[in-house]
Image (tube, rainbow, N blue to C red):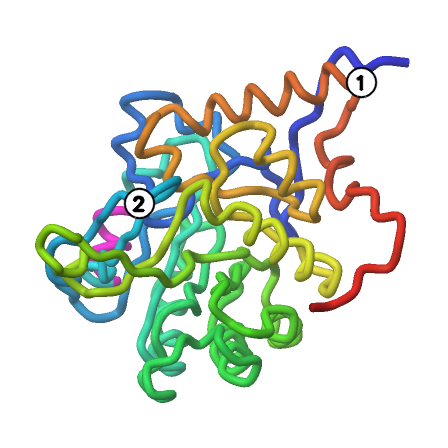
């Protein structure tokens, strides 16, 4: 019997989201509420906040490349107190759960930060362990299982809120990092952040970004991100949230088939402010056309007919 309605709700640990679509951190602000009802989103994910005041990286911070975008923003931040006092209230009545994203330089700073962020109005904390670890020569916490475990474990001891560990695609062994984050107490994984890239202006012979290198996002990285989601989702028991080049409903469905329980949309929202709404509506149309009554039935439904060999 064909379904005539679709239940778009999904579960991320203890959280129930009305649908699987949310923004990627850094690609969203409360001003989007002037374009569409924020309550239509599964969740809202705020821009990363840091314990210390940060000015961000030198200009230029963004460069367009083929099928994507490079950015090296540097996480400019007014600090935790400002975020709790001035940013959290902006989302209080938006109708979707607020996920705070936090970045820090050390394990201790991460732990202190999540305690400060464990306040009413914040439903979960996305731990951006893709950021540089000053205690490990600047390599991202999520580059190695040990440092990822240390950061998540320290945070887990200091907050009752769900922790979503945001992983980096630049790790050579993301599956081991995913397992370490799960073992440390992460409630979900966000897979993944941007891929380190670089471009050069051939007219000036200068790097396109003021910080020389930056994160590549957009459609160019989607096949890599889908692969990472599949690898992580088949390794861990906690939910995976997919991110990387999602611009259409079909993109979102592809991530869900690979094992993502939800998705984050980033670069596409810079091109079309209502991209997430289009994706939500498109997922519903996709499911209705195929008689799928529950969008959660798509999660991990890819058909693999033979053993998958590791590269």
Front residue (pair 18, 218): 218
Give the structural element (helix, strand or loop) at label 2.
strand
Going from the N terminus, do you reach mark 2 or mark 1 first? Answer: 2
Residue occupied by mark 1:
291
State which quarter of the image contains the N terminus.
top right
16 inside magenta stretch: no
Front residue (pair 232, 223): 223
Position in image of residue 161 (x %, y %): 52, 60
Position in image of residue 49 (x %, y %): 29, 59
The structure residue drawn at horizontal position 49% and vertical position 61%, both measured from the top left corner, is 166
Rendered view: 285 above or below 181:
above
Position in image of residue 298 (x %, y %): 74, 36
Residue occupied by mark 2:
65
Residue 50 lies left or right of residue 127; in this view the side is: left
Cα separation between marks 2 and 1:
39 Å
Give the structural element (helix, strand or loop) at label 1.
loop
Rendered view: 99 above or below 197:
above
Quadrant hosting residue 16 = top right
Q: State the residue lying farthest toward the front.
A: 202
For the record, the magenta segment spans 80-87
Position in image of residue 256 (x %, y %): 67, 41
Residue 44 appearing in the image? no
């Amino acid at each position: 019997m064909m379904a005539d309605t679709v239940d778009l709700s999904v579960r991320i640990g203890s959280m129930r989201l009305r649908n699987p679509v949310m923004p990627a951190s850094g690609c969203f602000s409360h001003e989007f509420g002037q374009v569409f009802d924020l309550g239509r989103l599964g969740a809202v994910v705020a821009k990363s906040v840091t314990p210390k005041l940060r000015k961000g990286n030198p200009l230029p911070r963004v460069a367009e490349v083929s099928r994507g975008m490079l950015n090296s923003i540097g996480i400019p931040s007014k600090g935790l107190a400002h975020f709790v006092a001035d940013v959290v209230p902006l989302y209080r009545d938006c109708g979707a759960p607020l996920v705070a994203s936090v970045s820090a330089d050390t394990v201790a700073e991460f732990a202190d930060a999540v305690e400060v962020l464990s306040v009413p109005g914040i439903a979960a904390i996305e731990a951006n362990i893709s950021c540089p670890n000053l205690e490990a020569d600047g390599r991202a916490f999520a580059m190695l299982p040990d440092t990822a475990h240390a950061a998540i474990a320290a945070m887990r001891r200091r907050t009752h809120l769900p922790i979503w560990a945001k992983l980096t695609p630049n790790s050579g062994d993301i599956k081991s990092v995913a397992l370490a984050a799960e073992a440390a107490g992460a409630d979900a994984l966000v897979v993944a952040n941007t891929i380190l890239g670089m471009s050069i202006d051939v007219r000036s012979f200068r790097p396109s970004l003021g910080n020389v290198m930056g994160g590549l996002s957009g459609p160019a990285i989607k096949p890599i991100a889908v692969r990472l989601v599949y690898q992580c989702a088949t390794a861990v028991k906690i939910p995976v949230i997919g991110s990387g080049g999602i611009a259409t409903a079909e993109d979102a469905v592809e991530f869900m088939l690979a094992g993502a329980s939800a998705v984050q949309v980033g670069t596409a929202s810079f091109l079309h402010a209502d991209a997430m709404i289009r994706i939500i509506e498109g997922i519903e149309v996709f499911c209705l056309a195929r008689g799928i009554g529950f969008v959660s039935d798509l999660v991990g439904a890819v058909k693999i007919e033979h053993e998958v060999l590791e590269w």
